[in-house]
């Protein structure tokens, strides 16, 4: 199941200047032309408050497809309406999500601190990666971990057992971006005219 899009003018409070004045559909079309191959999936078991922040971060990194596994309702406050410009796909079961990823030739990678996970910093991430994140409290379910292609974790050196899942998501997306920096830069320059833009939150 995917979301529908509006032709109405947009709320521009969190929109870069070059996209202001466009319709929602026009913004999506432009972002699609300049987006990256990376995709993000979130296992939505308990309406975690961090999910909105993950969505906003995915938008910032040029991700075009967001996959939500489990509950369709999620806490959108932290997303700052950025989900409106993403292609959001919903799956009621883990099996449906994995089947869709396999049919699209996607490489599904879970990001979680579990036994057998590899350090993110030592992994060469594939261009067709789908990074999967869980909830703040529960992490990723065993059912989903058993079906992914790889599991990675973010090395830490402090006393805390883990970092916030939204922070972990940002780090993982940045790691993928670094590995494909040249192609990402070319798309970013096309989108922003070669200069950083100020957007008002």
Image: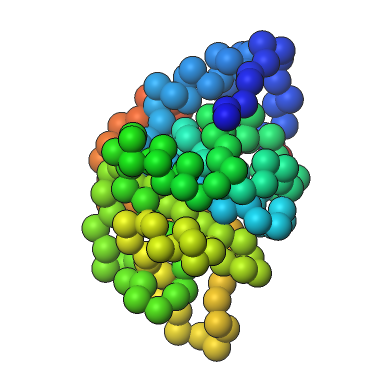
> Residue 21: in sight, yes or no?
no
**Residue 93 in the figure: left or right of residue 124:** right
Image vertical order of residue 188 relative to residue 21, above or below: below
> Residue 130: in sight, yes or no?
yes
Question: Total of numbered circles in the picture?
Answer: 0
Q: Position of residue 155 (x, y in %)?
A: 41, 76
Image vertical order of residue 124 relative to residue 191, above or below: below
What is the quadrant of residue 26 in the picture?
Answer: top right
Q: Position of residue 111 (x, y in %)?
A: 44, 62
In this orientation, which residue lies closer to the viewer: 22 or 25? 25
Going 57% across and 66% down the picture, which residue do you hit? 139
Image vertical order of residue 159 relative to residue 51, above or below: below
For the N terminus, give its image quadrant. Answer: top right
Q: Position of residue 124 (x, y in %)?
A: 24, 58
Going 35% across and 76% down the picture, which residue do you hit? 116
What is the quadrant of residue 24 in the picture?
Answer: top right
**Colouring convention used in this rendered image of the protein:** rainbow
Going 44% across and 24% down the picture, which residue do you hit? 32
In this orientation, which residue lies closer to the viewer: 191 or 73? 73
């Amino acid at each position: 199941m995917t979301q529908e899009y509006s032709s109405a003018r947009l709320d521009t409070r969190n929109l870069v200047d070059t996209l202001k004045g466009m319709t929602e559909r026009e913004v999506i079309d432009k972002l699609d032309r300049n987006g990256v191959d990376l995709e993000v999936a979130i296992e939505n078991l308990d309406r975690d408050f961090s999910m909105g922040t993950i969505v906003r971060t995915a938008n910032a990194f040029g991700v075009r497809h967001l996959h939500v596994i489990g509950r369709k309702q999620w806490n959108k406050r932290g997303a700052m309406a950025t989900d409106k410009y993403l292609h959001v796909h919903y799956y009621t079961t883990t099996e449906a999500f994995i089947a869709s990823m396999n049919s699209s030739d996607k490489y599904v990678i879970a990001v979680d601190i579990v036994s057998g996970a590899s350090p993110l910093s030592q992994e060469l991430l594939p261009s067709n990666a789908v990074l999967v994140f869980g909830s703040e409290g529960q992490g990723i379910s065993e059912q989903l971990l058993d079906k992914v292609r790889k599991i990675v974790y973010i090395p830490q050196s402090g006393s805390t057992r883990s970092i916030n899942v939204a922070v972990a998501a940002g780090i993982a997306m940045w790691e993928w971006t670094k590995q494909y920096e040249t192609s990402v830069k070319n798309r970013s320059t096309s989108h922003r005219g070669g200069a950083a833009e100020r957007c008002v939150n």
